[in-house]
Amino acid sequence: MKSLVLKNKKEFFVFPSSPFHFDGTFHKPSHYPDKLTDWEAGKYWQAIRIGKRLFGLKIENKGATQKPKIKVSIFYDTNISESELGKIKEEIIWRFDLNADLKEFNKLAKSDKRFYPIFKKWLGMRNSSAHNLYELLIIAVLLQNATVRRTVQMTDALLNNYGTKLKFDGKEIFAIWLPEKLNNVSEQELRDLKIGYRAKFIKRLSQNFAEGKIDELKLRELDQEDAKKELTKLYGVGPETARILLFEVCHQYNTFDHIAPWQQKIYSQLFYKKPLVPTNKIRDDIKKQYGDYSMLAVHYIWEDIFWKRKHKKIDWLEKEIRL
């Protein structure tokens, strides 16, 4: 594991579209605990890679829901160009969906009497992704067929062997490796870290990205069908992973088409307070109410229950997530 101390700092401001919810956007309690980001109310830290260079990010809330303003501090080692600063700013705006126009969604939310208190509480929250496409796919592979505890163990093992530890602003934040770093690492070496069959997926995916099989910036501009085709060219990416990535990476809000069995149990409790409701009914009810914003609506309700869990354990939820 490499270590990088970042002592230099540059700052700029970003003005997200209004309304905006800082903590709901920058902290997702439904995500498994990792060493890749850190958060406290009104403040957020992560590593970001631009090209092959790593930078530290600190993002702070300096505005209000209806008049949003965030301060971004970039930490770096030797120097930073205007071009790199510009790219970091563009990435932050894209990944955290800071220019999103949620007017139509907020109108729909007002018509939902049952869940409007949740939508009102998180007014302006964005579906956001702290990571680039390769990093997200590594996380997705580690989440497959594993309890959250197991995923955390596998993530830590990989980061400790191939990641980089960034030290900045009094924090230690890890960054996922570049895909080409695994070129000379055998599948067996990865298996030795006790990640099982996932070693093959990680090795092949890393090869895909090292060979430039997909261009993430171009992907963001494609329509849904073309984006899905591009994503499924990657090793191990099927329709379900592609659907998740369309929401996470491309901010397409209408991708609520498939419900995994473990999600079905949680959705049944959230939407109907029943142990198990047919997936078709869950999907059709949500799509009827929210149309093109169905996945975003589910995201709000989903995150809300995990925010509640931060303060008080929820018995039925604990059984499903098994952390």
Image: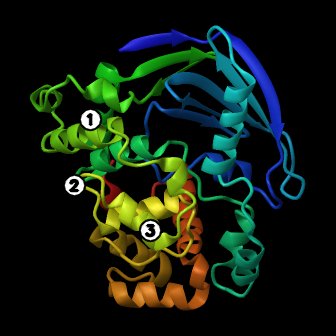
Please tell me in which quadrant of the rendered image residue 182 appears.
top left
- What residue would you read off at disc 2? 145
- At x 59%, y 80%, the residue is 292
Near mark 1 (Cα within 10 A), the count class, few <14, some 14-19 or many ≥20, is: many
Residues at circles 3 and 1 in contact by the CB criterion of under 8 Å: no
Circle 3 SS class:
helix
The N terminus - image quarter: top left
* Between discs 3 and 2, the one toward the N terminus: 2
- What residue would you read off at disc 3? 226
At which x and y percent is residue 269?
Answer: 42, 76
Residues at circles 3 and 2 in contact by the CB criterion of under 8 Å: no
- At x 24%, y 52%, the residue is 235
Amino acid type shown at disc 3: Asp
Residue toward you, 177 or 127: 177
At which x and y percent is residue 287?
Answer: 52, 86
Mark 3 → mark 2, Cα distance in angstroms: 28 Å
Mark 3 → mark 1, Cα distance in angstroms: 33 Å
- Taking 154 as reference, is 291 above or below it? below
Q: Is residue 209 left or right of residue 101?
A: left
Mark 2 → mark 1, Cα distance in angstroms: 12 Å
- What residue would you read off at disc 1? 154
User: Closer to the observer: label 3 or label 2?
Assistant: 3
Amino acid type shown at disc 2: Asn
Residue 317 visible here? no
Residue toward you, 79 or 256: 79
- Taking 140 as reference, is 9 above or below it? above
- At x 34%, y 32%, the residue is 179
Circle 2 SS class:
loop
* Between discs 2 and 1, the one toward the N terminus: 2
